[in-house]
Image (cartoon, rainbow, N blue to C red):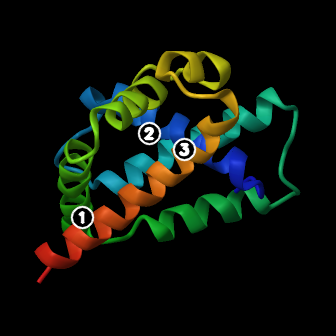
Amino acid sequence: MVRDQDLAEDLFQETVIEILHSEDRFDPTRRFLPWACGIAKNVVQRHWRSQKQRPTSGQEDLIADLAMVGSEGDDDLWKRERKALRLCIQSLPERMRRLLVLRYGHNIKGQALAESASLRAGSIRTTLSRLRWQLRQCIQAKTALNGR
Protein backbone atom coordinates (compact mmCIF):
# COMPACT_ATOMS: atom_id res chain seq x y z
CA MET A 1 0.00 0.00 0.00
CA VAL A 2 2.92 2.39 0.58
CA ARG A 3 5.58 1.00 -1.79
CA ASP A 4 8.38 1.30 0.78
CA GLN A 5 9.31 -1.87 2.67
CA ASP A 6 10.67 -0.11 5.74
CA LEU A 7 7.64 2.16 5.98
CA ALA A 8 5.34 -0.81 5.38
CA GLU A 9 6.95 -2.65 8.31
CA ASP A 10 6.57 0.42 10.54
CA LEU A 11 2.90 0.79 9.57
CA PHE A 12 2.34 -2.94 10.08
CA GLN A 13 3.82 -2.63 13.57
CA GLU A 14 1.51 0.32 14.29
CA THR A 15 -1.40 -1.78 13.03
CA VAL A 16 -0.52 -4.68 15.33
CA ILE A 17 -0.23 -2.32 18.28
CA GLU A 18 -3.58 -0.72 17.43
CA ILE A 19 -5.20 -4.17 17.09
CA LEU A 20 -3.86 -5.18 20.50
CA HIS A 21 -5.10 -1.95 22.07
CA SER A 22 -8.55 -2.40 20.43
CA GLU A 23 -8.92 -6.09 21.18
CA ASP A 24 -11.75 -5.40 23.62
CA ARG A 25 -13.77 -3.82 20.77
CA PHE A 26 -13.55 -6.93 18.58
CA ASP A 27 -16.81 -8.85 18.25
CA PRO A 28 -15.86 -12.56 18.42
CA THR A 29 -18.99 -13.50 16.45
CA ARG A 30 -17.49 -11.75 13.42
CA ARG A 31 -14.46 -12.62 11.33
CA PHE A 32 -11.16 -11.26 12.62
CA LEU A 33 -9.29 -10.66 9.36
CA PRO A 34 -11.73 -8.15 7.79
CA TRP A 35 -11.75 -6.26 11.10
CA ALA A 36 -7.93 -6.23 11.26
CA CYS A 37 -7.68 -5.16 7.61
CA GLY A 38 -10.01 -2.27 8.38
CA ILE A 39 -7.65 -1.17 11.14
CA ALA A 40 -4.68 -1.50 8.75
CA LYS A 41 -6.48 0.61 6.16
CA ASN A 42 -7.13 3.30 8.80
CA VAL A 43 -3.46 3.29 9.86
CA VAL A 44 -2.32 3.77 6.25
CA GLN A 45 -4.89 6.51 5.62
CA ARG A 46 -3.77 8.28 8.80
CA HIS A 47 -0.17 8.05 7.55
CA TRP A 48 -1.16 9.51 4.16
CA ARG A 49 -2.96 12.39 5.88
CA SER A 50 0.00 13.11 8.19
CA GLN A 51 2.36 13.16 5.21
CA LYS A 52 -0.13 15.10 3.10
CA GLN A 53 0.11 12.24 0.61
CA ARG A 54 -2.73 10.61 -1.18
CA PRO A 55 -2.56 7.71 -3.56
CA THR A 56 -3.41 8.43 -7.17
CA SER A 57 -7.13 8.57 -7.93
CA GLY A 58 -8.87 5.25 -7.60
CA GLN A 59 -5.82 3.62 -6.04
CA GLU A 60 -7.16 3.95 -2.49
CA ASP A 61 -10.37 2.06 -3.32
CA LEU A 62 -8.41 -0.62 -5.17
CA ILE A 63 -6.10 -1.04 -2.19
CA ALA A 64 -9.05 -1.37 0.18
CA ASP A 65 -10.68 -3.95 -2.12
CA LEU A 66 -7.44 -5.96 -2.33
CA ALA A 67 -7.07 -5.86 1.44
CA MET A 68 -10.56 -7.24 1.87
CA VAL A 69 -9.97 -9.99 -0.70
CA GLY A 70 -6.76 -10.88 1.10
CA SER A 71 -8.66 -11.04 4.38
CA GLU A 72 -11.03 -13.72 3.14
CA GLY A 73 -8.74 -16.36 4.47
CA ASP A 74 -8.99 -19.26 6.82
CA ASP A 75 -9.95 -18.11 10.32
CA ASP A 76 -8.75 -21.45 11.72
CA LEU A 77 -5.34 -20.85 10.16
CA TRP A 78 -5.23 -17.40 11.76
CA LYS A 79 -6.01 -18.96 15.15
CA ARG A 80 -3.29 -21.59 14.65
CA GLU A 81 -0.82 -18.89 13.62
CA ARG A 82 -1.66 -16.78 16.66
CA LYS A 83 -1.16 -19.78 18.98
CA ALA A 84 2.10 -20.60 17.18
CA LEU A 85 3.29 -17.00 17.57
CA ARG A 86 2.79 -17.19 21.32
CA LEU A 87 4.75 -20.44 21.50
CA CYS A 88 7.49 -19.04 19.27
CA ILE A 89 7.84 -15.91 21.39
CA GLN A 90 8.04 -18.04 24.54
CA SER A 91 10.89 -20.02 22.99
CA LEU A 92 12.99 -16.90 22.32
CA PRO A 93 15.86 -15.94 24.58
CA GLU A 94 14.80 -13.49 27.30
CA ARG A 95 16.76 -10.64 25.68
CA MET A 96 14.86 -11.03 22.38
CA ARG A 97 11.48 -11.27 24.15
CA ARG A 98 12.35 -8.07 25.99
CA LEU A 99 13.23 -6.38 22.70
CA LEU A 100 9.85 -7.39 21.26
CA VAL A 101 8.01 -6.04 24.30
CA LEU A 102 9.88 -2.75 24.16
CA ARG A 103 9.32 -2.27 20.43
CA TYR A 104 5.80 -3.59 19.95
CA GLY A 105 4.35 -3.50 23.45
CA HIS A 106 5.65 -0.08 24.44
CA ASN A 107 6.14 1.34 20.90
CA ILE A 108 9.72 2.42 21.66
CA LYS A 109 11.75 3.18 18.53
CA GLY A 110 15.19 4.21 17.35
CA GLN A 111 17.86 5.34 19.78
CA ALA A 112 15.57 4.95 22.81
CA LEU A 113 14.96 1.32 21.83
CA ALA A 114 18.67 0.71 21.33
CA GLU A 115 19.46 2.09 24.76
CA SER A 116 16.62 0.22 26.46
CA ALA A 117 17.63 -3.06 24.80
CA SER A 118 21.38 -2.49 25.30
CA LEU A 119 22.05 -2.69 21.56
CA ARG A 120 23.86 -0.42 19.13
CA ALA A 121 21.47 1.94 17.36
CA GLY A 122 22.71 0.76 13.98
CA SER A 123 21.87 -2.86 14.72
CA ILE A 124 18.29 -2.40 15.95
CA ARG A 125 16.65 -2.49 12.51
CA THR A 126 18.68 -5.54 11.46
CA THR A 127 18.05 -7.32 14.76
CA LEU A 128 14.30 -6.70 14.54
CA SER A 129 14.23 -7.80 10.90
CA ARG A 130 16.03 -11.04 11.76
CA LEU A 131 13.78 -11.57 14.75
CA ARG A 132 10.63 -11.14 12.61
CA TRP A 133 12.07 -13.56 10.04
CA GLN A 134 12.83 -16.09 12.79
CA LEU A 135 9.29 -15.77 14.14
CA ARG A 136 7.81 -16.21 10.63
CA GLN A 137 9.85 -19.38 10.15
CA CYS A 138 8.83 -20.71 13.55
CA ILE A 139 5.14 -19.95 12.93
CA GLN A 140 5.25 -21.63 9.52
CA ALA A 141 6.88 -24.72 11.00
CA LYS A 142 4.42 -24.97 13.87
CA THR A 143 1.32 -24.39 11.71
CA ALA A 144 2.56 -26.92 9.15
CA LEU A 145 2.85 -29.52 11.93
CA ASN A 146 -0.48 -28.64 13.55
CA GLY A 147 -2.40 -28.12 10.33
CA ARG A 148 -2.30 -31.76 9.34
Residue 147: where, in percent of width, then height? 15, 77
Residue 94: where, in percent of width, then height? 28, 33
The residue closer to the viewer here, 96 or 51, is: 96
105 relative position to 94: left or right: right
Q: Which residue is mark 1?
A: 75
96 relative position to 6: left or right: left
Task: State which mark lies toward you, 2 or 1.
Answer: 2
The residue closer to the viewer here, 22 or 87, is: 87
Identify the disc placed on residue 90: none
Q: Which quadrant holds residue 66?
A: bottom right
- Quadrant into which the C terminus falls: bottom left
Residue, x 59% and y 65% (percent of image)?
65
Above or below, 20 against 126 in this view is above
Residue, x 37% and y 66% (percent of image)?
137
Q: Which quadrant holds residue 97?
A: top left
- Residue type marked 3: Thr
- Residue type marked 1: Asp
User: Decide: marks 2, 3 in contact (CB < 8 A)?
Assistant: no
Identify the disc placed on residue 16: 2
22 relative position to 102: left or right: left
- Residue type marked 2: Val
Q: Residues within 10 Å of mark 3 (few under 14, many from 20)?
A: some
7 relative position to 138: left or right: right
Q: Which residue is mark 3?
A: 127
